[in-house]
Image: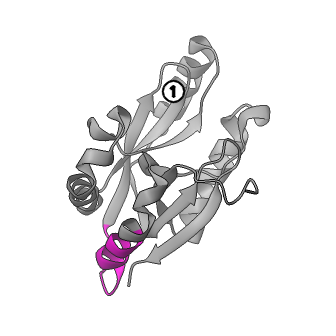
Amino acid sequence: MSANTVPAPIIVTALFGRRDQGWFDAMRSEHFPPERNQLDAHLTLFHHLPPSSVDELKHRLSGETRQVRAPTARIAGLMSLGRGVAYRIDAPELVAIRARLADAFAGLLTPQDAGGWRAHVTIQNKVTPGVAKLLLESLSRDFVPREVEIAGLATWWYRGGPWEPLSRHMFA
């Protein structure tokens, strides 16, 4: 089997609109340690679903997005990650979608995915707590909540490095 046909865990994320994706990516480029910044900014719904769930997952994601208006979402605040900083995302309709998916895949969820979900976009990670605290304080000074566009949901293969696209499911 070649590397890209070996079964791999599946990650599920929300997709941002182009403008918001660009803004989050710029924040991540500015604040993430460059040697660790292998991914675009992302909002993870599930970190690890088994490859055996791929067909059912795609079916359910299509059902959650096809002819469905995009959920409202906003950057509601900043979060300390201890060794990093994230923007907290408030999106009640996305929380409901994730809850339905969690119910559907309950027996397959890892402890990380089965626990509570804190919607966030990490813009800094793997730095010292002091560096993270300085960024959190700096960004907090000028922070203003703002709307963000959730354009769709996506699945990705995780094979240890940058994620490989699997499917995209766009809202109406």
Q: Can residue 111 be spotted in the picture?
A: yes
Packing grade of label 1 (10 A; few <14, some 14-19, many >=20) is many
Secondary structure found at label 1: helix
Residue at x 36%, y 56% (from the top left corner):
74
On the rendered image, what quadrant is the N terminus found in? bottom right
Residue at x 40%, y 60% (from the top left corner):
53
Vertical relation: 137 (above or below) 101: above
Q: In front here: 162 or 131?
A: 162
On screen, residue 26 versus residue 65, left or right, reads right
Q: In front here: 49 or 137?
A: 49
Q: Residue 43 in the image: state x and y as whole percent.
A: 47, 51
Please say whether residue 33 is one of the residues in the magenta stretch: no
Q: Amino acid at mark 1?
A: Leu
Q: Residue 149 in the image: state x and y as whole percent.
A: 44, 67
Q: Residue furthest front?
A: 1
Q: What span is in magenta?
A: 58-71
Q: Residue furthest right?
A: 35
Residue holding disc 1:
136
Quadrant in the rendering for residue 59 = bottom left
Quadrant in the rendering for residue 31 = top right
Quadrant in the rendering for residue 165 = bottom right
Residue at x 64%, y 20% (from the top left corner):
127
Residue at x 71%, y 58% (from the top left corner):
4
On the rendered image, what quadrant is the C terminus found in? bottom left
On screen, residue 92 versus residue 55, left or right, reads left
